[in-house]
Amino acid sequence: MLNDINTIFRMCENNNLISPHNLEIPTFVPRLRLGVLASGKGSNLKALIRLTKSELEADIKCLIVNNAQAGAIDIAKKNNIDCSILNHNNYKSREELDEDIINIFLKYNIEIIVMAGWMRIVTPVLINKFKNRIINIHPSLLPSFKGANAVSKTLEHKVKITGCTAHIVEEEIDSGEILIQAALRVNENDNEQSLLKRIQLIEHQILYKGIAIAGSRLRINY
Ligand code: GRF
């Protein structure tokens, strides 16, 4: 008996805290149409592709990246997802880039835009066109450590518990409604790389749930 209790305690200790924790993923008929914005290696994109084959009735219809080196491009290719490269240096303003993003997503009838490591600030041009339909994943427990370098700031401040947040994108950076968060312990020997690695694992666990929350609201308002 004692052993059983200890096992349960250990399991609780190892489990990361996710809230809301008892979320039921709704069915989406027809399947949700997702567009993804990415700038980096694409681990969130990869996880999302996998989850759309099991947990979430959604399809990633297209990917937009802002640099030709983004690892996300290869992931999209391997999974037959259309990809557009919009180099931000070719645009005179953020608004012009956003206009092109809108045109691509409209062409694919995108319902929800997922920022999976999109390292550009977006403007009201995009935000207002897709009001409450743009979701970002951020590597901290917002409202702590908004903006860039969230993980190094976490370590600098000797924070003991951190995590990640999926939220609605608003004009002020990392400030929109929080949809779901996951928390984990910072270990004494963590560096930026080791901590980010663990945070990303829980990002993958919550991003699709954030999409499900936003998607179900959208479908109710049809
Ligand atoms: C993620 O850690 C996310 O929190 C941040 O950018 C990173 C993207 O990683 N916004 P990946 O490209 O999905 O691996």
Image (cartoon, rainbow, N blue to C red):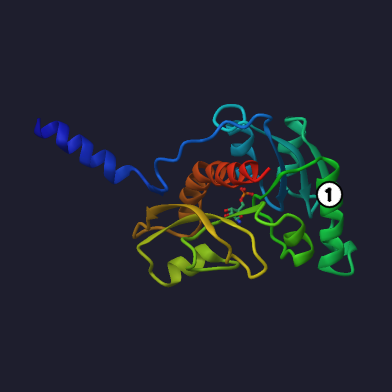
The residue shown at (27%, 38%) is: 11
Name the residue: 73% across, 30% down.
Answer: 79
Disc 1 secondary structure class? strand
**Horizontal relation, residue 91 to residue 183: left or right:** right
Q: Name the residue under label 1.
A: 85
Locate residue 121 relative to residue 147 in the image: left or right. right
Percent x, y of residue 28: 62, 32
Q: Give the quarter of the figure containing the N terminus.
A: top left
Residue 134 percent across, percent down from the top left: 67, 53
Under mark 1, the amino acid is Ile
Where is residue 48, by image quadrant? top right
Reply above or below: 58 against 175.
above
Question: Which corner quadrant of the image does residue 67 belong to?
Answer: bottom right
Q: Can residue 66 be seen in this view?
A: yes
In front of the other: 45 or 130 = 130
Most extreme residue toward the top is 54
- State the residue in front, 155 or 207: 207
**Which class describes the residues within 10 Å of circle 1: few (<14), some (14-19), or many (20+)?**
some
Q: Quarter-wise, where is residue 49 in the image?
A: top right
